[in-house]
Amino acid sequence: MLELRNAVRHYHQGTRIVEAVRGVSLSVEKGEFVSIMGPSGSGKSTIMHLMAGLDSPTSGQALFMGRDLAAMRDRERAILRRTRLAVVFQFFNLVPTLLASDNVALPLLLGGTPRPVARGKAAEALARVGLADRAGHYPDEMSGGEMQRVALARALVLDAEAILCDEPTGNLDSASSTQVLDLLRSLADDGSRAVVMVTHDSAAGARGDRLVRIRDGKIESIERPSRA
């Protein structure tokens, strides 16, 4: 479903070339939860951005359902992320002037869904992440854990086939982290979605079906953590 084929990503910093990703090949299927771990600067977030079509490889390929993301137009990739491939960021990216329900409904409204339908689906998504009672609150009235779950509800409302999360527990306390990880685990376990999570937390990484360790832009190892 999600696939990198010998993906390379170089950046120019003045006269210096930074090799962020160096020949990474990795695939993720529906029903699978893959954690990507590595030290700061290892290339793990760049790998997620390549998979999400937020960045393009210098060489190699990033594919979604067999389609080369780099071959799509910007508008096609944007529509893909609004409909089938959801991205959840560490800092939530919620609109501060919108209620939680409106933040969740926003991608549907942008896609032309009638407002009553979008609001109904947003209410269902918020209920699924345990926030039905926070629908009428603004982001600054919620905790970090609640805002992260609103961001996940926004991904759920799309019924996306793939959900990619960049450090989703990075700013949360242990109780909120557990709630978010339980939710991500359940999204993969229902068999209809692929979940990819970038994390620096070994306990969080161990919740995946596979733990991919990245160092210096390369895959160092792939483990299968015990889920007992």
Image: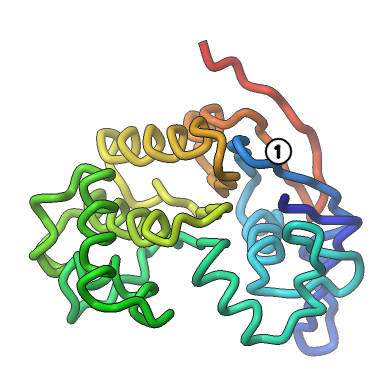
The residue shown at (31%, 47%) is 172
Q: Is residue 38 above or below residue 14?
A: above
The number of numbered discs placed on residues in the rendered structure image is 1
Tell me where residue 143 sits by quadrant. Answer: bottom left
The residue shown at (22%, 62%) is 120
Pick the residue in front: 75 or 141: 75
Left or right of residue 69: residue 105: left
Tell me where residue 8 sits by quadrant. Answer: bottom right
Q: Position of residue 60 (x, y in %)?
A: 91, 65
Tell me where residue 159 sits by quadrant. Answer: bottom left
Pick the residue in front: 209 or 2: 2
The residue shown at (75%, 80%) is 72
The residue shown at (37%, 73%) is 108
Name the residue furthest top: 228
Left or right of residue 63: residue 29: left
Left or right of residue 30: residue 13: right
Q: Position of residue 151 (x, y in %)?
A: 34, 60
Q: Is residue 165 above or below residue 71?
A: above
What element does badge 1 sit on? strand
Q: Position of residue 132 (x, y in %)?
A: 14, 50
Pick the residue in front: 53 or 84: 84
Residue type (three-letter) at the residue carrying disc 1: Val
Residue matched to label 1:
212
Q: Position of residue 70 (x, y in %)?
A: 79, 76
Left or right of residue 22: residue 53: left
Q: Residues within 10 Å of mark 1 (few under 14, many from 20)?
A: many
